[in-house]
Amino acid sequence: MKIIMANASHFKYAPIICETIAASALVRGTGIAKRSPEYIQRKLQNGNAIIALDGEIFAGFCYIEVWGHEKFVANSGLIVHPDYRNQGLAKKIKKAVLALSLEKFPQAKIFGITTGLAVMKINYELGYKPVTFSELTTDPEFWKGCQTCKNFDVLTRTDQKMCLCTGMLYEHKIKKKPLNTKAFQRLKSIKEQLFLKKNNTSSAPTDKN
């Protein structure tokens, strides 16, 4: 199984990606925004997607959407072909697309919206937290993408404040620099010497003659 950054050579998979997304929405009875093969191909061409392949057979997919002048990045369209489900592939794809997002857009806020409990669990394990929609992008083009979802009326009735989807925002982890043990020991030794010198000076007898 290969989980790789997609490119233009994967154009032939665009139709099956769209078909798999649509079929999944019907089976689950949940709202999923529809995407055209042309839209998917644009993601493939600009390197903003991850695809999983079993040889030449399509297994899974997820793509990146960029909003608000690269201030926000959404990981969207996660799908695993029915033949490859229940094997942990969805989490591997989500992990790969998150890594790609962090590499290409290190300053952006990374988020996703979903109705699926399984995806929520994966997101949580990868470091996402549930947030209100007010913490997500206000770019109207993003929310326009929800128009093909059957729950879009809920979103419009609430002025884009809530829907059946849950918004989740990735919490960037700040990597701590490893402790320089030698430098720490030198500093500790200097401090101890200064402490001893200070104590010896203050305790020394004073010559009053």
Image (cartoon, grey):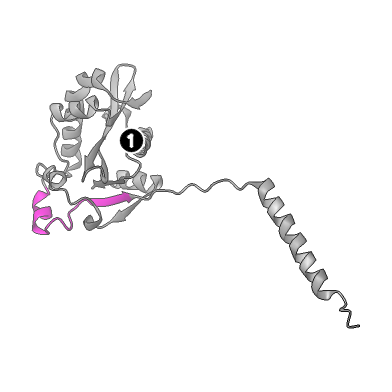
> Residue at image x 28%, y 56%?
131
Say whether residue 20 is left or right of residue 206. left
Nearest the viewer among 154 and 138 is: 138
Residue 95, quarter of picture: top left
131 left or right of 195 in image: left
- The image shows residue 70 at horizontal and vertical percentages of 25, 42
Quadrant assignment for the C terminus: bottom right
| 157 within the magenta span | yes
> Does 207 appear above or below 106?
below
Q: Which residues are magenta?
A: 151-169
Residue type at mark 1 is Lys
- Residue 191 drawn above or below residue 168: below
Any magenta on residue 28?
no
The residue under the point 13% across, 27% down is 38
Spot the residue most to the bottom.
Answer: 208
- Position of 183 with respect to 82 (left or right) is right
Find the residue positioned furthest to the right. 209
Q: Position of residue 76 (x, y in %)?
A: 24, 39
Q: Which residue is mark 1?
A: 104
Image x and y of residue 186, in percent: 71, 51
Q: Is residue 88 above or below residue 15?
A: below
**How many numbered marks, from 0 up?**
1
| Whether residue 6 can be seen here | yes
Q: Nearer the viewer, residue 102 or 143?
A: 102
Q: Position of residue 111 (x, y in %)?
A: 28, 46
Which one is nearer the viewer's eye here, 166 or 25?
A: 166
Residue at 77%, 68% (x, y): give it: 198
Mark 1 closeness class: few <14, some 14–19, many ≥20 residues within 10 Å? few
> In the rendered view, would you say 113 is above or below 133?
above
Report whether residue 77 is seen. Answer: no
SS at badge 1: helix
